[in-house]
Amino acid sequence: AYRKGGYHAVRPGDQFCGGRYIAQRKLGWGHFSTVWLAFDKETSRFVALKIQKSAPEFAGAAMHEIEFLTAIAQGDPSNSKCIIQLLDHFKHSGPNGQHICLVFEFLGDSLLRLIKYNRYKGIGLSKVKEICKWVLLGLDYLHRELGIIHTDLKPENILLVSTIDPSKDPIRSNATPMLERPEGGLNGCTVSSTIERNLKRKAKRAVAKISARRESMEGISENKKSLEEIDMRCKIVDFGNACWADQQFAEAVQTRQYRAPEVILGAGYSFSVDMWSLACIAFELATGDMLFIPKGGHGYDEDEDHLALMMELLGKMPRKIAISGCHSKDLFDRHGDLKRIRRLKYWPLDKLLVDKYKFPESDAREFAEFLCPLLDFAPEKRPTSAECLKHPWLNSQDPKPIDDKKDIGLQKVEVGMSKLRV
Ligand code: ATP
Ligand code: MG
Ligand code: MG
């Protein structure tokens, strides 16, 4: 992908925007871009630099993202609404073309890494609650104040707020930023091609070693932090697929596993698709497993399996809803039953949590009481973020003492909420 129209190759020490930003190390990558930790010489702080692929469709996508990020930043000057903040953007010309670059505040690992870090065992309900609160604050801002639907909420697109010094990289033990490209070696232009090949091989081995060490979470291994100590503050990122609720265009939105039923049915969608995804994410954080993993099979496709899985968990979809989309005729018969998957095994969420994931019954029941309304087949019945924030499950602490007096309960609510007003 490092060719004309594709990614821009970056080396540590490379300069951007007339020398203002200095690349330090790669943080991640996606279909559209590579993301680098960079040092901003003007503000003397570390930032995340997203360098988009250069082909016109990628440039268009970056402009789209900038439109939303600009509105988000303008409406949140104090940067307290749990959404990634765009600091700057500019164009950068390289051998593969002109790349739109976005400069963000530097954040930490994604929730996906958090799930992996905990070996897919689930992170505990009190942490799930805390994360849900932050994400709900972000969604409330997006939905109610701005009229934006994210449409691609998933663990990868929620990043923890980093509490570590970004310059503390395993490669370099010093904490000072690199201000220019190191001389010689891989980056020099004088080494012959055989030497360069050898160096590359060596570098590859070193990178493998480093990434093995990084299997534990960034910044956590060094400080020997346990999961208990990680601040669960997080922010919503990746507005590449966001849309204004009053001017949608894409029909097929959301990443498969987090997709709401109305999107599969082609029945139109609104803010509540993000609420559906949030429920899928909360389940995944709590159990380490995705809530729905649809697969095509003999005689049925992924969409049909997905709808069948939903109904096995949530009960039969009301006929009126089942027949309401432009794809309904291919999927359902006139009684509102799936045409090609006839036998469903009902396994409700609270039972699933107890039977498969060994949750204590009261935990399972309370968690299911929070999640099930978000997974309502009727999109307009799903609670809004503001309503969710008031839900008792979010404002109770674990484990619950047996004879919990009411006034103590209230005190706990205040403690829980005060954390959100930092
Ligand atoms: P996608 O295919 O997911 O749309 P993309 O090319 O649009 O990818 P992003 O998802 O925005 O790129 O970013 C790619 C990765 O870079 C993220 O998954 C994350 O690991 C890392 N990253 C992005 N923004 C930041 C940030 N502000 N701080 C730290 N890391 C970041
Ligand atoms: Mg992404
Ligand atoms: Mg994206």
Image (cartoon, rainbow, N blue to C red):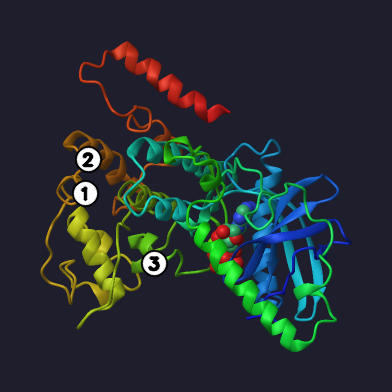
Residue 265 appears at what percent x and percent y? Answer: 33, 68
Q: The residue under label 2 is which amino acid type?
A: Ala
Q: The residue under label 3 is which amino acid type?
A: Arg
Which quarter of the rendered image does ligand 1 occupy?
bottom right
Instruction: Name the residue tied to disc 2.
Output: 364
Instruction: Name the residue tied to disc 1.
Output: 357
Is residue 234 shown to the viewer in this render? yes
Q: Is residue 4 above or below residue 250?
A: below
User: CB under 8 Å between callouts 2 and 3?
Assistant: no
Determine which quarter of the picture holds residue 123.
top left
Tell me the residue at 62%/55% (across/down): 170
Q: Tell me the number on the disc at residue 256.
A: 3
Is residue 240 shown to the viewer in this render? no
Q: Earlier in the sequence, mark 1 or mark 2?
A: 1
Left or right of 236? Residue 121 is: left
Q: Secondary structure at mark 3?
A: helix
Q: CA distance from mark 2 to mark 3?
A: 25 Å
Q: The residue under label 1 is which amino acid type?
A: Tyr
Tell me the residue at 65%/67% (across/down): 34
Of all residues, the one furthest to the right in this rendering is: 18
Residue 40 appears at what percent x and percent y? Answer: 80, 51
